């Protein structure tokens, strides 16, 4: 049926479709699996809000994930040629992890008060989710294009279906966090892991180029599985918790410093957006 339709429209379309199919299927499978990371992170970042605001924040977060992926596709060539964009995005993802675990107070001031990173206002939460969506979208699209550099059609189809997968996972994410509270912390570890991996790719481009984009994607997904498994075991196995706690306490020191320094820069960048969101919310009230 599909073959007849494509052949009738353009005889070369069927050949193009067959050629692109393995790439499309690979993108769909891997992007669908990796969307768990994005969905869990959005749910975790909105978990402190009341039910009504949490639902709004998550919906806005998922819309942002879709929109930023489309934008990243449109400006993919520019992003690939300007590594500083990927660097800033990766740095922000690592900061999210560090700020969460260090328990640092966000240097952003809202309504005259310093707001704790775990208890942001609705406007602050939306801003943080939007920036995370943007950073993950850049990583997502650049990696997809690396997987199929000569066939953007396959990339468009793969990323689009990956977006649909994100929406399907979204409904499950908050329920998973409610059932397994440790997944809230897992989500931030996963976000930081993606950021660190992207920073490593930028630092050692030849190694990752030789490794190949598909293997990099598999490496990323394997890391997500390992991290998720370890955090679930950590929450359920007292012995593992006893072994890892001293190591985690040592790691908190550099994380706290990183969260403070980078957080001071981020607040300057995000302040106008937070105020704009707060003003828009106030005008509707």
Image (tube, helix red, strand yellow):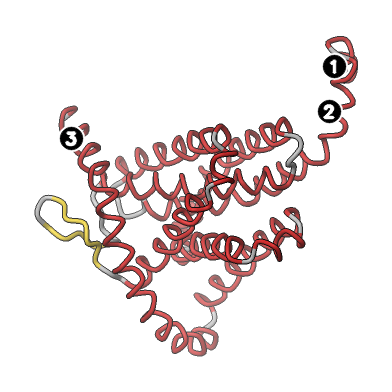
- Picture residue at 40% right of the left edge, 63% below the top: 95
Q: Position of residue 141 (x, y in %)?
A: 60, 43
Marks 1 and 2: in contact by CB < 8 Å? yes
Marks 3 and 1: in contact by CB < 8 Å? no
Secondary structure at badge 3 equals helix
The earlier-in-sequence mark between 1 and 3 is: 1
User: Seen in the image, is 50 located left or right of residue 236?
Assistant: left
Q: Position of residue 126 (x, y in %)?
A: 33, 44
On residue 166, the disc is none
Residue farthest toward the left in the current orientation of the protein? 112
Which quarter of the figure is the N terminus placed in?
top right
- Picture residue at 54% right of the left edge, 85% below the top: 240
Measured in 3D between alpha carbons, the distance from the residue under mark 3 to the one under mark 2, in whole angstroms, is 48 Å
Q: Position of residue 246 (x, y in %)?
A: 44, 89
Question: Which residue is tagged 3?
Answer: 279
The earlier-in-sequence mark between 2 and 1 is: 1
Secondary structure at badge 1 equals helix
> In the image, is residue 262 above or below residue 250?
above
The front one of 243 and 18 is 18
Measured in 3D between alpha carbons, the distance from the residue under mark 1 to the one under mark 3, in whole angstroms, is 51 Å
Please tell me in which quadrant of the rendered image residue 283 appears.
top left
Secondary structure at badge 2 equals helix
Question: Which residue is tagged 1?
Answer: 6
- Picture residue at 56% right of the left edge, 32% below the top: 74
Question: Which residue is tagged 2?
Answer: 17
> In the image, is residue 67 above or below residue 103?
above
- Picture residue at 21% right of the left edge, 56% below the top: 108
The front one of 205 and 232 is 205
The mark tally for this picture is 3
Residue farthest toward the top in the current orientation of the protein? 8
């Amino acid at each position: 049926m599909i073959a007849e339709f494509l052949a009738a429209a353009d005889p070369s379309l069927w050949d193009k479709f067959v050629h692109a199919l393995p790439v499309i299927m690979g993108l769909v499978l891997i992007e669908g699996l990796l969307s768990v990371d994005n969905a869990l992170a959005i749910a975790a970042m909105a978990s402190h809000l009341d039910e009504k605001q949490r639902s709004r924040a998550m919906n806005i977060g998922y819309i942002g994930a879709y929109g930023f992926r489309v934008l990243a596709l449109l400006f993919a060539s520019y992003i690939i040629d300007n590594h500083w964009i990927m660097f800033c995005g990766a740095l922000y993802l690592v900061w999210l992890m560090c700020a969460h675990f260090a328990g640092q107070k966000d240097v952003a001031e809202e309504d005259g008060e310093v707001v704790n990173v775990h208890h942001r206002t609705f406007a602050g939460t939306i801003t943080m989710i939007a920036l995370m969506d943007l950073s993950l979208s850049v990583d997502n699209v650049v990696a997809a294009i690396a997987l199929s550099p000569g066939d953007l059609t396959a990339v468009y189809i793969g990323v689009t279906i990956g977006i649909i997968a994100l929406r399907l996972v979204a409904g499950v994410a908050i329920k998973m966090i409610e059932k397994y509270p440790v997944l809230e912390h897992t989500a931030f570890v996963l976000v930081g892991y993606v950021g660190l991996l992207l920073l490593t790719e930028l630092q050692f481009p030849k190694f990752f180029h030789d490794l190949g984009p598909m293997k990099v994607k598999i490496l990323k997904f394997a890391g997500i599985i390992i991290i998720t498994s370890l955090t679930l075991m950590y929450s359920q196995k007292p012995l593992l918790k006893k072994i890892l706690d001293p190591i985690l306490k040592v790691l908190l020191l550099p994380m706290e410093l990183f969260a403070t320094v980078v957080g001071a820069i981020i607040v300057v960048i995000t302040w106008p957006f937070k105020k704009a969101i707060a003003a828009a919310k106030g005008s509707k009230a």
